[in-house]
Image: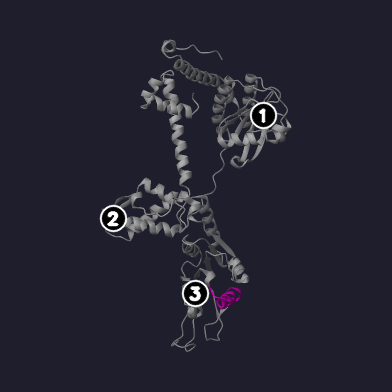
Amino acid sequence: MSKPPLPRSLHRVSIFDPALAEELEEDFMRLMLTAEALIWAQSHLPALLHASTPQSLLSTLVDIAKETTGVPRAWGLTWKGDPAKNRISIQAFAGDRDEAVPPPSSISRTVVGQVAAEGRPSWSNDATADARFGAAESVRAYTLRSVGCLPVGTSGVLYLVDPDAPGRFTRTHRLQLSALCALAGRTLDARVPSPQPSPKVPRVPGLVGETPVMQALSQTVHAFAPMPWPALILGETGTGKEAIARALHNLSPRRDAPFLAVNCGAIVASLAESELFGHEKGSFTGAERTRHGLVSRVGKGTLFLDEIGELSGPLQVKLLRLLQEGTYQRVGGEQTLHFTGRVVAATHQALQDGDFREDLYYRLAACVVPVPPLRDRRADIPALAEHLLNRIQDELPGAAQMHLDPAAINVLTARDWPGNVRQLENTLRSAAARCLAIGGGALSSQHLHVPGAPSSAQHTGSALKESVAAFERQQVIIALAATKGSRGEASKRLGISRQWLHRLMTREGLL
């Protein structure tokens, strides 16, 4: 690649400020070399488009790279797995003029994993002396010197190695191959078959959310709802376990029979057995008539026992008999009665770690339904918050209309919500009251009094900073190209000071 001619204006600048002229010349050269590399890469685009499969495209890319750089070894790779944790599987493809495919051990997973995770090229003039890669087994075993690795789309990599000569890849090589791999990446992603979408999971009444964990929950509810066996719902406080129990009932053949719910921790201990199983007249002081308990009244429907871990030992024995034999007796009674309903229990406790009967646990756990906490499905929070706000609005007929503004949604999404959906709903109730006090309208972040700082705030802020930095870099490059490297004109075009432009260029490695 020939050195582009410099604009005459730079010669005039050098008369008054040689240092500035030298700096501008370097910027101009970098931009022009990048432009020429793009033109060079576009000249090879027809060959890339001619490739009919991902494998042939990578092979074509390898041939172009070897011809351009003279590197003795080059391979196209595809990878699967989690590069962020350095857990990837690699498949290698040689060029069309090569037959040998390298053994997996000869490819540095450290280098490939870093490039796959970061999505940007990695170059080393001497890998054995490079602190980044010197510890990698393949680098030590094969005493690699010049190494280049470039991302190709979302699942490919171009891997170049010269085991003997350090400093193989020139500045021009790096610019050309970076541009070429960027073009090849778009083509490769188009060649890779898109995964077939999973069958749409039917919605579950009362559940809001489309995240994978909620899709899995919906599948579980639909699978267990028609079954005749007991079910055990596991989840933190406030996750909506009763809503899951009602969904199991409403989607079952028992939907037309009663659904009765009781919190085992809220029943007075002395009356708990009577509450569940009923009592005969005169069976204890105050028993003036025969009373039907929940087990009897539910009939063929669903009995929901919330916080089952709070049930006393004697009642656990009676519940075990009910589940094992389908029979029970009222307090003070001798007649054996039959239970034809279904028991669905729920708890936020680890039942197997306490005094809960192991045999009863396994009876209840015929169908286990784990409910995810809200922090594990943050992407559902905007839709869930809107749903809850609409429900709050329905409880306030005649009140002014309210809606969540974007800032409020961002605040809600960033929270961990230890109290889960219940805490989210209570927070929205308080915010709605404050919003209505000033006439309704947009429910903003100012109305949300959420104690504590979100654990994910730093992550969210980091992602935002990265997006802003990427945008700034793009605008700086465009401005410098449009003004032929003139920092003064570029700063005016961007509406910033020349000093600030210098800082941006330094930060982005454009100097």
Location of residue 99 by image quarter: top right
The amino acid marked with disc number 1 is Ala
Q: Give left or right: position of 104 versus 158.
A: right
Q: Which sits earlier in the primary sequence, circle 2 or circle 1?
A: 1
Q: Give left or right: position of 485 versus 167.
A: left
Q: Residue at x 50, y 50 (%)?
A: 211
The amino acid marked with disc number 3 is Gly
Kindly identify which residue carries mark 3.
299
| Relative vertical location of residue 327 with respect to residue 215 in this rendering, above or below | below
Count of numbered circles in the view: 3
Q: Quadrant of the N terminus?
A: top right
Q: Residues within 10 Å of mark 1 (few under 14, many from 20)?
A: some
> Mark 2 and 1 residues: CB-CB less than 8 Å, in contact?
no
Location of residue 69 by image quarter: top right
Q: Residues within 10 Å of mark 3 (few under 14, many from 20)?
A: some
Kindly identify which residue carries mark 2.
436
> Which region shows up in magenta?
311-326
Judge depth for marks 3 and 1 and give the one in front. 1
